[in-house]
Image (tube, rainbow, N blue to C red):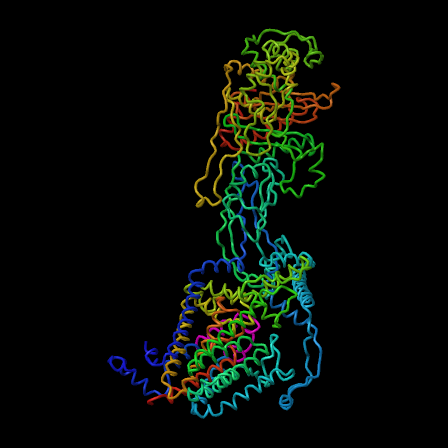
Amino acid sequence: MKRTIETIPMVDASIHAHMSPLDRLQLAALAGLMVIGTLFVYSATAANPAVADLPWFDQSWFKQIVWYALGVGAGAVVCAMDYHVLARWSVVAYWAAIFFLVVVLVPGLGTVRFGARRWIDLGPFQFQPSEFAKLAFILALANFLSRPSDELRSPAAFWKGIGLLLLPFTLILKEPDLGSALVLLPTGLVMMFVAGTPKRYLLKLAGVVGVLAALFLADVLFAPPGWWQIPVESYQRDRLLVYFGRDYTDFAPPNATPADLQRLRQQQLDDEYNVRQALISVGSGGLMGKGWRQGTQNRYGYLPRAVAHNDFIFSVIAEEEGFVGSVIVLTLYAVVLFTGLRIAGRARDRLGKLVAVGVVTLLFSHVFINIGMNIRIMPVTGVPLPLLSYGGSSVLGSWIAVGLMQNIHIHRKGY
Amino acid sequence: MLIFDELKKNDPQLRAVAIVLAGGLLWLLAGLWWVQVVSAREYQSHLETQSYRTIRIPAIRGKILDRKGRVLAEDRPCYDVSLYLDDLRDQFREEYARLRPVRIVTRAAPFWELWLGAPSVVTQRVRLAQSQMDALTWQARCAVAGAVAARVGQELGRPLTLNTQDFERAYEQRRALPYPIMENLDPAQMARFEERDPGNLGADLEVLSERVYPQGTTAAHVLGYLREDDSSAEGEFAFFNYRLPDYRGVVGVEAGFDKELRGRAGAAEVLVNNLGYRQSETVLVPPEPGHNVVLTLDLDLQRAAEESLARHLGADARGAIVVMDVRSGDVLAMVSSPVINPIYHSNSPAYLNDPKLRPQINRATQQNYAPGSIFKPVVALAALEAGLDPEALVDNPGYVYVGRRRIRDLAAPGQYNLRRAIIHSSNTYFVTIGLHAGAANIARVGKEFHLGERTGLPTRQETAGIFPTVNIVRRASWRPGDTANLSIGQGDIAVTPMQMAVVYAAIANGGTVLWPRLVARIEPQDPDRGGPASVFPVGVVRDRLKAPSRDLELLRDAMLAETEDPEGTGHAAAVPGLHICGKTGTAQIMNEHNQEIGRTTWFASFAPYEHPRYAVVVMVENGTFGGTTCAPIAHDVYEAILKEERAALPQTARDETHHRNDSHG
C-alpha cells in the first residue's frame, strides 16, 4: 500500500481497490475460471453420444452454469454475514458436519457410487457432506486458534487442535475418500503454523506423520504376500502401486500360475489406464494444443468419459489448449490464491487471517493434487479441481470458501 | 506485483506460506513444461500408436497391351457391399438396450416423490456379470449386422446371411475396416443398390480393383498370373496395421515386370476411438499407379496361331508356336498349348497338375525338345564351312548306322546333294557330312546361334536347352556315334521353339543372331504424368554368323524348295502368294530299351523368301511327322500373316502385291 501511493499511476487503481468492498481482481480470476469450466465441461461431455442426445438443459455444461449461479448466491449469502457471527456458529457447523459424516457412513442413508459411500441422497440432488465438512473445519479451527497466542503454547491447546483435525479426517477416510481427507492435513497444519503454534510441536507432528506415512507406504508397496498388511481399500492400494511404479506380479502368491500372472499384468494395465491416458492427453497437447473440442483423447473416448469432465477436466484443457492453456489456468489459480493471501494479510484480526489462510491452503491443496495427478506428480485421488471440475458440491463449496475470503476482505483493516 | 505488496514484512508466517504456495505452483508449471513441451513428441507418438491404424493401399496395377495397344490384362474396379461398423454403433447400442433383461419392481420411493406422482412400479435393469454383458453385446452386434445383411440381400435379390464366426474375427481384428457382406456386384445389383432409399443403412458400396484378362486365355503363358501377396515392396513402409489385398506376379510378364506393373502402394491412416471404431481417414501417401507394359505380340496373330493349333489338334494339343520378326527380333506370337486361365484360381488343381498335359509350362520356352531334322541346316552350315562341296553326291542305301544303331532313312535310296538332302531330309547325307565336318565344327556354329543358352525373355519361364560345347566334343568320351546323332538333331541336343525361331531368323536375315524382344516399351498409365516411356531397343544383335551369305542363300533355296516342291516334306505349309522357306523335323523319343515312346514334330520356317520378315516355328509333342502334323498349322499362321499384311496396306498397294506374288508363283 505504501509503495502504490508513491507510484503515481497506481494511485487511482489502488484507491479504487481500497474503496471497493470486494476484491475485484480475485472475482475476475474466478469468473475466468468459470468461463473455462463451462467451455471444457461442454467439450468433455459433448463427444459422448449418450450426453449429446440429452436436451440442452439436462447437459452437464448447463447444470454446471446453474451450480455456478447457486454457488455465487451461496457465496453472497456467506459474504453478507459478518464472519465473526459465522465463527460463533462454527462449532455448531463443525458438529453438524461431523454428524453428516457419520450419517453418510450408515448404510441406507449414504449412497454408494463408484465403491465409496460419500453422498447423501436428497432426492433431486446428492449432497457430499465432506465438501462442507472441510469449510466447517476451517471455521472451527480458526475460531479455536484465534485465542491469544500465549494459550496456543500449552500442549493441551495443541492436542485439541489436532483433535479437531483428526475427527473429520478419520471419518472422511472411512468413506473412503482419501483425497478429501488428505487436503485437511496441510490446511490444518498451515493454519496452526500461521496462528503461531510453537514450531517444535509442528515439527514433531510433521515428523510423526512423516514416519507413519513412510511405514504405511513401505507396508503397502513392499510387504510380500502373506505378511501383515494395513487394511486399505484395494483400489487405493492399486493407485499407490501404480503411482510408485510397482509391478503387481511381485505381490502374486508364490503358487501363482502363468495365467494368474497374466491376469495381474492385465489388471495393472487397466488400473494404469486413467493415468496413462491423462498423461498422453496432457503431453500430446504440446505447446499450443489441438483446439477446443479437437482433443482426440477426449473426443474418441480414450480419456474415460466417466472422469473426463470432473476429476480429469485438466487433461481435457491441457490437451485442447496446450501448455499455453495450462499456464492460463495456473495463472488464474495463482491470482485467486495470492489475492487470498493478501486478504489474510489485510485481515482485521487473527480470526479473519486464519480463515483466509485456511481457505487458500485448502484451494491450493486441491489444485496441486488434481493437476499433479494429471502429470503423475501425485497419485490418483478423487480430488476435484475447484470451479473447473463438474460437480455441484465442489462448486458450492468453492464459492462458499470464496465468500468467506471476500467477507474477510469487506471487514478488513482500515475500511 | 500488486498482490504481493500486502504481505506484511513483519508477518514471516504468511510470507512462508506464500513462498510454499509459489513453490508448489512453480513445481506444477515445471512439470507441465516437461510433459507438454519437452516430452510432447513422445506423448504424441504414444497417442498415434494407440489411436491410429495404418493401411497399405495397393496401387492400380499397370495394363499389359499388345503392340497395337489392345488390352491383354488390366485392373478394373469391382464393387462390394460392406458394413461400416462405425455407422452401426448406435444400432448396436440400441439393440443391446433392447436385449438387456429388466425386471419390474415396486419401488420404495421417498414419500415426496410419491406425492409428486412418481410411479411406484418401475422397470429396473438386472445386474449382469461382465461375461454376460460381453455375450449380450456380441449377440446385439450379430443381430444388427445380420439384419443389415438380410436387408441388403432382400434389396438386391440375393439372400444373404451373416457368417457370425467370420464377422466376429473381422470385428476383433479389422474393426476399423469395412466388412464385406456381398462381393463382386453385377451391374444390375449395383444399380439396385444405388437406387434404394439412402437411409442410414450402415452398409455401403466399397470399390476395390480386380485383374481382368479381356482376351480370356489368349497369350496366357506370356502374361503369366498373379498371386495374392500384400507384403511391402522394397522402399515402402514396412509396418502396416492393415493391408488391403494386393497381388504379385508369379511367372510371365506379370512377374518379369512386376515392379513396373505394380507401381507404388500408398498408405492411409485411420483414426480410431478407444473401442477401435473408425473415426476418420487420411491418405498419407497416395498410391502411384503402375506402368503399362506394351508387348511386341500382335493380338490378331497370337489368336490366329492359337486357333490354328486348336483347330488341327484340339484344345489338349501339347505344342507351341513362335512367330518372330526376323529383322527386329520382335516376338509377334508365342503360343503354348494346352492353355491355362490367367486367373489362376479358376483353373482346377487336377487340371493344373495333370502329369501329361502339364498346362503350367510354357512349351515355347520352358521345355527341352530334341530338334531332329530342323537342326540339319546348322549342320549344313558347319559342313560348308569345313569345305563341303554342296554338289557332291552322297549315296543313300535307305538306312544309316548311327553308332551301332541302324536307323531308317525316310528319304528314298539314291544319290543326294545338299539341296536334295534338305528337301527330302536325308539322314544318311547329314550323318555323312556331319562326321566329315566333325563335332567341333558343329559345336562352334551352334555356339554362334547361342544354342544351349537362354534367349533372355523376361517371363521367368525359360530353359537353356542342351548343346555340347567345343570342349565337350573334344573329350575322349565323345564318340563318332554322338556326332552322327547330333548331325540329325538327336542325342546330346535339346532346344526350345523360341531358340529355333532365333536360329531360323538368323538364316533368314543374312546371319544376324538377335535377342528376341517381347516387351516393346513401358509407359505410364497417364501419359501426362509419370515421366517418359522407356523403350526397349529394336533388333539388338547377339551374334553374327561367320558363314558367307552364299552358304545361307543355298540353305534358303533348298528350304524354299522343301515347301514349294510338291514332293518336299513341308509342302503342306505352302500358301499361295507367299514364298515360304521351311524345314520339317520329327525327333523320335526313345526309352532305355531303344523303343520309340514318342515323337517331337517340328516345322521351322521363314517367309517371304525374297525379303524374309517372319520366322514361324511350330512344335507339337507326340505328332506323327513334322510335315503332316506341324506344316498345316504353320500354313494357317502364314495365311493369317498374309491377311494381316494385306489389311495393313492401302488398296492400290494391296492389288500390286497380290499381282506380283501371283506372277511369281
Q: Position of residue B502 (x, y in %)?
A: 55, 24
Q: Position of residue B536 (x, y in %)?
A: 48, 33
| Main secondary structure along the magenta-highlighted residues | helix
Residue ID at (71%, 80%): B104
* Magenta-span inclusion, residue B321: no
Give left or right: position of A162 versus B167: left
Q: Position of residue B251 (x, y in %)?
A: 59, 37
Residue ID at (59%, 78%): A174
Give left or right: position of B188 versus A308: right
* Magenta-span inclusion, residue A44: yes
Q: Decide if residue A362 is in sight here.
A: no
Quarter of the image that includes the C terminus of chain A: bottom left
A105 w.r.t. B388: above or below: below
Q: Which residue is nearer to you in this view: B401 or A318?
A: A318
Q: Quadrant of residue B426?
A: top right
Q: Which residue is nearer to you in this view: B655 or A178?
A: A178
- Stretch of the chain drawn in magenta: A34-63
Q: Decide if residue A304 is in sight here.
A: yes
Q: Position of residue B199 (x, y in %)?
A: 59, 66
